[in-house]
Amino acid sequence: MGGHLNINHLIFLGHGALWTVGLSLIALIGGGTVGFAIALARISPLKSVRLASAAYVQLVQGTPLLVILFLGYFGLAAIGLQVSPLVAASASLTLYVAAYLGEIWRGSIQSVPKPQWEAAEGLALSRTQRMLKVILPQAIRIATPPTVGFMVQIIKNTSLASVVGFVELMRSGQIVNNSLFEPFVIYAIIAVVYFAMCYPLSLFSQRLERRMGRGRVNLAPA
Amino acid sequence: MGIQLDFPAVLERWPSFLGGAALTLELAALATMFGALLGTLAAVGRGTHNALIAGACKVYVETIRNTPLLVQIFLVYFGLASLGLKFSAFTVAVAALTINVGAYTAEIMRAGFEAIPRGQIEAAEGLALSRVQIYWHIILLPAVERVYPALTSQFVLLMLASSVCSQISAEELTAIANYIQSDTYRAFETYIIVAVLYVILSLVMRAGFWGLGLVLFPRRRRLGTPL
């Protein structure tokens, strides 16, 4: 206790903010890779693959991220792996983001008009060619606005990694608060920094959406 | 290596788990009710011609939607405390969740309002309905009917997000799990059980909202489409 907020505290918070960006990128890249596989599995011709991926999505979307983080943190320890908070948080966020991005992208792929699929088939393209050359280029256009919107959710959700002891923006704020005990000021600063990261992305997503006209894909994560 | 899971040791605490699940439902139900009200007011406020009210509602919605719930909870918790107001952690949790879900509800409701064809409002004016009648019968009720699916999935997400309230030690499912795991040293088993309970809770909520929709919107039930 005691002391005032000084430049060192702000530098510490700045480091935390950098880690928030870093963790968000890890979650986006990891979750995007797994999520793409999920999206393809959800529309697989094999029924068992479709069912398994649907079950995965339902399970993850029915569980709070906080509980998934605890499971990642304690679960990896329970199977004898000593993991750092960074690894635990990255793994949990990847699994979480994959379920949501997978659903968004499945919706985007499926909203490519049916005749496009049929035309590609009529031109004797293989399934892979059809996906890569006809469907995905169109699906990416549809998927961009909701994906950018979901990046806002990712940034906000990385704040939960603080509970497993990963020092990102939120956790660094808690640490600074422990020494100064000025919670209202410090958390207000933290809120402003999060807002500064998220709001431009929100605006960008809205602009993309407007340019595309009314998108058919909706999402509403917390 | 080798996992040793001991579920019985944790499962014998089942009354605590069920109590936690009930508390989570209570928290979610209260925040949903107040949040729906707050969000509808904010959506109406954003559509008014008074620039001050519209601007204030926009600032509220954008601020909440672009900051993490965890930060909001801490701000409400410590903000109220620094004003010298003492509330239980549960009350603070309800307040913070209400403020949070209100902003998302406002966005959804606004989309519903914008989808009401202008001609219907003009027709209502032509039939000499009062402003209140127009708002209620022509704008609000049809808009709710239209956005009901989006609203309900937002409320399920709110229930899941309420787990974050364990961080200010409000009594709910995750907080009770934290208790049990520190008592039994069986963290992995505890959180697996809690995850299963949350999945069940979200399925129960979805089913409940679906049933409520059948009762509330008979037209949708008969025609299969919203207005």
Image: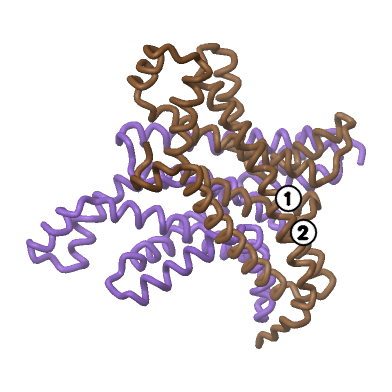
Q: Is residue A121 left or right of residue B168?
A: left
Q: Label 2 belongs to which residue?
A: B175
Depth check: give the residue in front, B58 or A190: B58
Disc 1 crowd rating (10 Å Cα; few below 14, some 14-19, many 20+) is many
Give the answer, above or below, for where A212 lies relative to B10. above
The chain letter under disc 2 is: B
For the residue marked with disc 1, what is the amino acid?
Cys
Q: Where is residue B118 in the image (x, y as percent from the top left)?
A: 35, 20
Distance of label 2 from label 1 (alpha carbons): 8 Å
Which residue sits at x=40%, y=65%?
A38
Give the answer, above or below, for where B197 lies relative to B111. below
Whichever of labels 2 and 1 marks the residue nearer the N terminus, that label is 1
Q: Label 1 belongs to which residue?
A: B165
Residue A192 seen by the camera: yes
Disc 2 crowd rating (10 Å Cα; few below 14, some 14-19, many 20+) is some
Dots 2, 1 in contact, CB < 8 A: yes
Chain B shade: brown
Give the answer, above or below, for where B33 lies relative to B204. above
The purple chain is A
For the residue marked with disc 2, what is the amino acid?
Ala
The N terminus of chain A sits in image quarter: top right
